């Protein structure tokens, strides 16, 4: 019979006062020994007992309702604690006894929760797609993996989108309320037909493509906008990929399926509504924050938008006096996109499998935060990891709208032999930089290659072996995107690709090349690139415009082909310039083109 290598000394009085307060902080075998001090008339005596560990299995805390099929999967592997409607304080108290936590959208998994776990919490499972309620940076700092269930509710969300589309077109909700109020207003609720109308699907991922399939079946002409949508997949179901502006200006109906990111936040604003056909109809079953809700009310009042059908809102639930919710031309539902019996069971199974796999130490394709990296590797590569992600972010922002990113080439220049330089983390961070600005997917070392493949993104790597000391892992990193147009023509190299290159100087990532132009600017804050005629006073003119608008310049560098010829000015700025400020820069006579890039 196996016993523990060491035992704990417990007082009998403490056991009597609180017999359930034992908290073990080290793994225990199924059978272990405990030595207890037992009161005796001749003094205390030590009595040893052999104890069977009933809780050798991991413990999973389920904080919100989960389908029975998922619970059954968990019960086969772990002890389950289903505690619903806990306060934040109750969750923090209970979490130190748990190895895994499963939540939906209501429970907030904050930094305090991770700190309260005392390092025991190994995985947080989000039963759904969005992870807005989980503090990812805190999870990573505490070595806790976060996984979600991104596929199980795809059909349910698509069906709900189509339901809102058809009910909006035929005024179903308004007519139902009217009849129940004792009215019979047939002439008031004349609808519009879907056959032959153009539907723009904004975001052609899993849900968007399923909506497109169903809309085609209704006789609609479907177009889509998504920078990463594989053209062959779109063509296979008869969908044409177009630019953002073309989608807005040519469609009768618009269905939103894009993630909420800094780039898409309030992307449907006054400016976007002004580009739409008068009388357009909008459906949103994605994320509320992609729509500027006040701007939508103005567009509805002006008749630019005839109707809207919304399942999601910037703040949920919306305020009771919301003008948007109470607008007579708006149909609303309380975030029901994934609310079918089948989807709920599917999500339960998907998240249960992901959590069990993570507790077994398996790498999860649905992991949304970075795994732990050996300290010595991270320490050496840390500045290059930052450089890699920023080069990816910079490169993808240079791609013109409507151009699908399909082929990326990464070049590493190093004096180290290939076996001495593991580029997986760097490749993952470049992938992260390329995808995250326009996607809700969180890319890390675990899921980078899977995510790129899923989006039809091919990333090839090349190494240039340099002479010299291998003390530094890398001399420079170069990122090229082929077969795309650029919103900044000077970023196109002589061979026709968007090209950016950078290196680390004194621990700080620097941009050293854009297209064929050499520059030298720190990749901190944000960046303005200007192509200009090389002539005296240009730095002063641009700097004056920024200074007048109280935009602080951190770095400035000019690269040129030859004196008095074309040059590219790279300007690092601490604040985001207003549109008016950027317009003034563009109006400087010698400036031929410019672009603002967020890093």
Image (tube, helix red, strand yellow):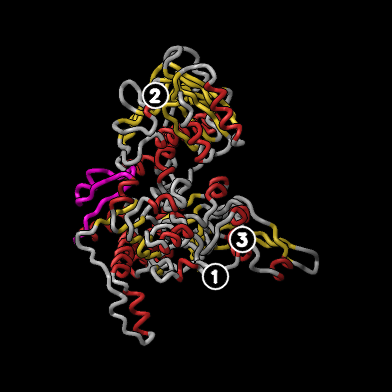
Please report whichever mark, 3 or 1, sits nearer to the chain's N-terminal start.
Answer: 1
Q: Can residue 68 be seen in this view?
A: no
Q: In which quarter of the image is residue 312?
A: bottom left
| Membership of 232 in magenta stretch | yes
Residue that label 3 marks:
92
- The Cα atoms of the two marked residues, 2 and 1, are separated by 55 Å
- Bounds of the magenta span? 217-243
Give residue 85's mark.
1
Q: Which residue is drawn at 44% across and 31% down?
A: 594
Residues marked 2 and 3 touching at CB (< 8 Å): no
| Membership of 69 in magenta stretch | no
Please report whichever mark, 2 or 1, sits nearer to the chain's N-terminal start.
Answer: 1
- The Cα atoms of the two marked residues, 2 and 3, are separated by 52 Å
Residues marked 3 and 1 touching at CB (< 8 Å): no
Q: Which residue is drawn at 34% across and 31% down?
A: 481
Please report whichever mark, 2 or 3, sits nearer to the chain's N-terminal start.
Answer: 3
Name the foreground residue: 30 vs 572.
572
Q: Residues within 10 Å of mark 2 (few under 14, many from 20)?
A: many
Residue that label 2 marks:
515
């Amino acid at each position: 019979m196996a016993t523990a290598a060491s035992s704990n000394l417990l007082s009998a009085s403490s056991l009597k006062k609180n017999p359930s307060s034992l908290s073990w902080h080290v793994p225990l075998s199924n059978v272990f020994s405990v030595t207890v001090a037992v009161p005796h008339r001749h003094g205390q005596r030590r009595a040893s007992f052999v104890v069977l560990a009933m809780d050798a299995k991991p413990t999973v805390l389920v904080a919100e309702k989960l389908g029975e099929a998922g619970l059954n999967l968990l019960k086969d592997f772990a002890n389950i604690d289903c505690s619903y409607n806990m306060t934040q304080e109750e969750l923090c108290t209970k979490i130190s006894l748990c190895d895994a936590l499963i939540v939906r959208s209501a429970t907030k998994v904050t930094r305090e929760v991770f700190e309260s776990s005392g390092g025991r919490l190994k995985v947080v499972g989000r039963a759904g797609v969005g992870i807005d309620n989980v503090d990812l940076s805190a999870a990573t700092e505490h070595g806790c993996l976060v996984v979600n269930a991104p596929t199980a509710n795809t059909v349910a969300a698509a069906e709900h989108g189509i339901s809102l589309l058809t009910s909006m077109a035929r005024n179903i909700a308004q007519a139902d309320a009217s009849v129940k109020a004792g009215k019979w207003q047939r002439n008031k609720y004349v609808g519009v037909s879907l056959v032959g109308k153009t539907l723009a699907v904004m975001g052609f991922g899993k849900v968007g493509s399923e909506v497109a399939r169903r809309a085609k079946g209704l006789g609609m002409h479907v177009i889509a906008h998504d920078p990463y949508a594989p053209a062959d997949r779109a063509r296979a179901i008869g969908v044409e990929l177009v630019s953002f502006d073309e989608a807005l200006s040519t469609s009768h109906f618009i269905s939103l399926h894009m993630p909420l990111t800094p780039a898409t936040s309030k992307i449907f604003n006054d400016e976007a509504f002004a580009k739409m056909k008068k009388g357009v109809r909008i459906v949103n079953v994605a994320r509320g924050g992609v729509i500027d809700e006040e701007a939508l009310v103005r567009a509805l009042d002006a008749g630019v938008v005839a109707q809207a059908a919304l399942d999601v809102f910037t703040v949920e639930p919306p305020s009771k006096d919301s003008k948007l919710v109470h607008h007579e031309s708006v149909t609303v539902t309380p975030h029901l996109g994934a609310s079918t019996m089948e989807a709920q069971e599917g999500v339960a199974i998907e998240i249960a499998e992901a959590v069990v796999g993570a507790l077994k130490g398996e790498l999860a394709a649905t992991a949304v935060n970075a795994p732990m990296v050996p300290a010595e590797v991270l320490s050496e590569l840390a500045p290059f990891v930052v450089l890699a992600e920023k080069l990816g972010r910079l490169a993808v922002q240079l791609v013109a709208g409507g151009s699908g990113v399909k082929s990326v080439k990464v070049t590493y220049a190093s004096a180290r032999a290939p076996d001495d330089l593991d580029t997986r983390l760097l490749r993952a961070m470049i992938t992260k930089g390329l995808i995250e600005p326009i996607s809700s997917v969180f890319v890390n070392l675990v899921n980078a290659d899977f995510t790129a493949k899923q989006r039809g993104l091919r990333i090839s790597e090349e190494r240039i072996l340099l002479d010299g000391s291998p003390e530094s892992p890398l001399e420079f990193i170069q990122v090229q995107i082929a077969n795309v147009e650029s919103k900044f023509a000077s970023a196109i190299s002589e061979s026709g690709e968007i090209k950016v290159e950078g290196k680390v100087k004194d621990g700080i990532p620097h941009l050293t090349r854009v297209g064929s132009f050499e520059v030298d600017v720190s990749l901190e804050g944000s960046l303005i690139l200007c192509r200009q005629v090389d002539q005296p006073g240009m730095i002063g003119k641009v700097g004056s415009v920024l200074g007048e608008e109280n935009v602080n310049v951190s770095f400035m560098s000019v690269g040129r082909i030859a004196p008095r010829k074309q040059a590219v000015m790279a300007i690092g700025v601490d604040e985001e310039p207003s549109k008016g400020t950027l317009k003034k820069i563009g109006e400087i006579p010698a400036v031929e083109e410019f672009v603002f890039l967020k890093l």
